[in-house]
Image: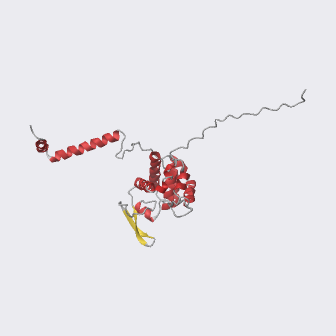
């Protein structure tokens, strides 16, 4: 009887290491393909077919581009990824896009054009990804840099979730952009810092939603109000006339 070690030695000698490596790689590709077919991504999320942008969303992207002199294709990418976050995570797409417009001057700021970072996210540790360094507030400052819109939005979501004082924002429904924005603002009563030190930040974000009609890019419909079940009763009409 051959030992396990001897079997491995004979196996390697028979097929050769290059062939073995090829078989391993092929097996891994097969496993990955099966995962995709079964509707599972590497991160455990359901893989769904991509949904093309609606005519409304494309028109909104064009309107934003014309207002700020930015690239419509870039804006469409961010709108699409914001809609994906709403579909899979329940985050209001209008709120996310309005914040990107405000913080990046409509996707036209120097930082955004060089880093695809629309939120002004700093690149200080513990962040260990790609950075873009520029002069900011009297010193050379590293900012987070991204390869695409999906990477930027997912990282921004993770950043917000990592701050416990923003947990109320993620408790909001996907159609509640106003509640989401309000929950990102400072709350002096609860001693919670906000996303921005500007007390008018929330109003500015809401104004952008209204200006560009960003509610039209929302993919989650607000439930219709339930009809009242109470029955109205009409009091009896009092009888009039002379009592006999």
* Residue visible at 21% across and 43% down in the picture: 23
Quadrant in the picture for the N terminus = top left
Specify the farthest residue to the left. 1
* Left or right: 222, with 34 as reference point: right
- In percent of width and height, residue 234 lies at 74, 33
Is residue 61 at least partly visible in the picture? Answer: no
- In percent of width and height, residue 154 lies at 42, 53
Specify the farthest residue to the top. 244
* Residue visible at 43% across and 64% down in the picture: 111
The residue lying toward the viewer, choosing from 199 and 97, is 199
- In percent of width and height, residue 3 lies at 11, 41
* Left or right: 37, with 80 as reference point: left
The residue lying toward the viewer, choosing from 162 and 7, is 162
Residue 121: quadrant of the picture = bottom left
Residue 124: quadrant of the picture = bottom left
The residue lying toward the viewer, choosing from 162 and 26, is 162
């Amino acid at each position: 009887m051959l030992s396990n070690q001897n079997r491995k030695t004979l196996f390697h000698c028979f097929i050769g290491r290059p062939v073995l490596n090829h078989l391993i790689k092929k097996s891994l590709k097969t496993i990955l393909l099966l995962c995709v077919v079964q509707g599972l991504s590497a991160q455990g999320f359901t893989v769904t077919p991509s949904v093309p942008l609606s005519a409304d969303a494309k028109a909104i992207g064009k309107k934003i581009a014309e207002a700020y002199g930015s690239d419509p294709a870039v804006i469409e990418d961010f709108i699409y990824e914001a809609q994906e976050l709403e579909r899979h995570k329940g985050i209001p797409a209008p709120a996310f896009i309005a914040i990107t417009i405000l913080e990046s001057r409509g996707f036209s700021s120097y930082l955004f054009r060089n880093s695809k970072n629309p939120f002004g996210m700093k690149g200080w540790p513990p962040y260990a990804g790609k950075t873009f360094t520029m002069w900011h507030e009297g010193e050379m400052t590293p900012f987070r840099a991204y390869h695409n819109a999906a990477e930027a939005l997912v990282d921004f979501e993770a950043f917000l979730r990592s701050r416990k004082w923003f947990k109320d924002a993620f408790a909001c429904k996907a159609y509640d952009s106003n509640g989401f924005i309000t929950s990102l603002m400072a709350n002096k009563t609860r001693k919670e810092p906000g996303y921005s030190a500007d007390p008018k930040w929330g109003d500015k974000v809401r104004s952008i939603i209204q200006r560009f009609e960003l509610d039209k890019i929302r993919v989650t419909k607000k439930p219709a109000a339930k009809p009242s079940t109470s029955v109205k009763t009409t009091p009896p009409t009092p009888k009039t006339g002379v009592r006999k």
